């Protein structure tokens, strides 16, 4: 009786620790034994806790602010340049 209870508790814990949630602003990359297995969209997913790992990738648009730079133009004037770069992860089909 005690062994059966222990086995059932272990199975429930493995099931609970295998649940992953992918947020709408992320996509999940699932690896099985260190090799790419599948790609997951937002929602609930169950993975094998010891065999599989899930990495979440943020797919929202990100902004990188460059530092203010002081430059000298061809006609020897000083100017300050400020830049911002935007990047977004896109799939091959886009």
Image: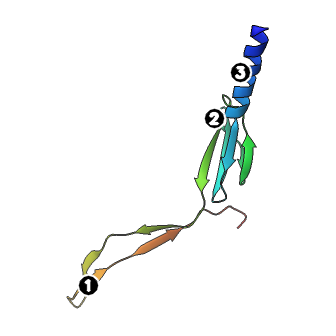
Q: Nearer the viewer, residue 89 or 41?
A: 41
The residue located at (72%, 15%) in the rendering is 6
Q: Residues within 10 Å of mark 1 (few under 14, many from 20)?
A: few
Label 2's element?
A: loop
Expressed as whole percent of the image width and height from the top left, the position of residue 90 reads 64, 63
User: Is 50 placed above or below 22 here?
Assistant: above
The residue located at (72%, 36%) in the rendering is 47
Give the residue at mark 2.
34
In the image, taking residue 39 as reference, residue 57 lies left or right, namely left
**Alpha-carbon distance for marks 2 and 1?**
50 Å
Q: Residues within 10 Å of mark 3 (few under 14, many from 20)?
A: few
Give the residue at mark 3.
10
Q: How many marks?
A: 3
Q: Give the position of the N terminus as an image quadrant.
A: top right
Label 3's element?
A: helix
User: Is 30 placed above or below 11 here?
Assistant: below
Q: Nearer the viewer, residue 43 or 92?
A: 43
Label located before the other in sequence (1 or 3)? 3
Label located before the other in sequence (2 or 3)? 3
The residue located at (60%, 60%) in the rendering is 59
**Alpha-carbon distance for marks 2 and 3?**
25 Å
Give the residue at mark 1.
79
Q: Nearer the viewer, residue 28 or 3?
A: 3
Q: Which image quarter: residue 53?
A: top right
In the image, taking residue 57 as reference, residue 13 lies left or right, namely right
For marks 2 and 3, give the one nearer the viewer: 3
User: Is 7 placed above or below 26 here?
Assistant: above
Expressed as whole percent of the image width and height from the top left, the position of residue 34 reads 63, 35
Label located before the other in sequence (2 or 1)? 2
């Amino acid at each position: 009786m005690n062994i059966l209870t222990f086995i059932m508790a272990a199975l429930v814990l493995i099931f609970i620790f295998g649940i992953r949630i992918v947020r709408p602003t992320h996509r999940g990359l699932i690896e099985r034994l260190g090799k790419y297995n599948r790609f997951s969209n937002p929602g609930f997913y169950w993975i094998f806790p010891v065999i599989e790992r899930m990495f979440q990738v943020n797919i929202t648009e990100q902004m990188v602010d460059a530092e203010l730079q002081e430059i000298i133009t061809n006609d020897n004037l000083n100017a300050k340049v400020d830049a911002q770069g935007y990047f977004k992860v896109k799939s091959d089909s886009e």
